[in-house]
Amino acid sequence: MRPGNSPIPNLAPMPALIFSARWLQLPLYLGLILAQGVYVFLFLKELWHLLHDAFKLSEQSIMLIVLGLIDVVMISNLLIMVIVGGYETFVSRLRLEQHPDQPEWLSHVNASVLKVKLAMAIIGISSIHLLKTFIEVGALGGLPFCEPALLAQLANEAAVGTGKQCTTLTTQGVMWQTIIHCVFILSAAGIAWTDRLMSGLAARHQQTAEAH
């Protein structure tokens, strides 16, 4: 609702064209909705795999599948945050003020808040991936690295029922994954600190303006 129910101002042709360019983002958000559908299918497929093979899987295998399901849910939450928050911030108002299912965070969302929330969501997703990696490393038991020649050999052995396993994890890969996760945390802390600093400056400027 516009303040005082004032009419929408008529824009000149050039400002109207530039302002309407925001609707070019609409296909992007519709595409993310389709990507959300793909993740729903992936979740159901992994869930079926867990339920179908529950009695044959080891505890570590079940834990990895469950972590994979959590990972899918967190990525889906990230997609919803980008779709709803991004559309509300950069395209058009959703006008959900009186809707009973309005997300709590949407009432005060802006570009800065959205950046911080996205950064925290990415850290959560990275944490799940890192935890899966640590669990897989603990379950390796001296498995060889999956080089192309070894993969071909294992494929032939699997065809005759004597197949073994290999791993794609390396010490250097785990180290870099940990470093990248720490960089994500530092980046999120920097974004949050910058947002707090800018919010404080804006509040002080508003107080100064009101005092005058």
Image: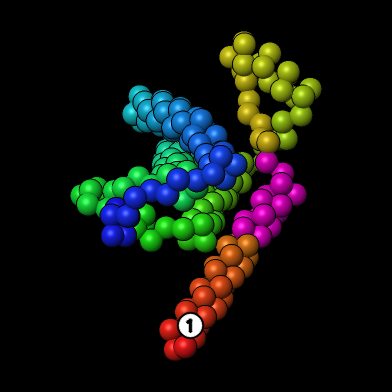
Looking at this view, is 105 or 142 the one in front? 105
The spot of residue 59 in percent (x, y) is 42, 41
The spot of residue 63 in percent (x, y) is 44, 42
The spot of residue 85 in percent (x, y) is 43, 49
- Against 156, residue 105 (above or below) is below
Looking at this view, is 205 or 57 the one in front? 205
Looking at this view, is 132 or 166 the one in front? 132
Left/right of residue 132 with respect to residue 55 in the rendered view: right
- Check disc 1 and give the amino acid type: Ala
Q: Which residues make up the magenta segment?
A: 169-184
Which residue corresponds to the image point at 28% horizontal and 54% vertical from the top-left? 5
Q: Is residue 126 magenta?
A: no
* Corner quadrant of residue 150: top right
Which residue corresponds to the image point at 50% horizontal and 45% vertical from the top-left? 11
Left/right of residue 143 with respect to residue 202 in the rendered view: right
Q: Is residue 182 magenta?
A: yes
* Corner quadrant of residue 139: top right
Q: Main secondary structure of the magenta part?
A: helix
The spot of residue 186 in percent (x, y) is 63, 65
Point out the residue furthest to the bottom here.
211
Q: Which residue is mark 1?
A: 209
Q: Residues within 10 Å of mark 1 (few under 14, many from 20)?
A: few
- Against 210, residue 151 (above or below) is above
Which residue corresponds to the image point at 42% horizontal and 58% vertical from the top-left? 109
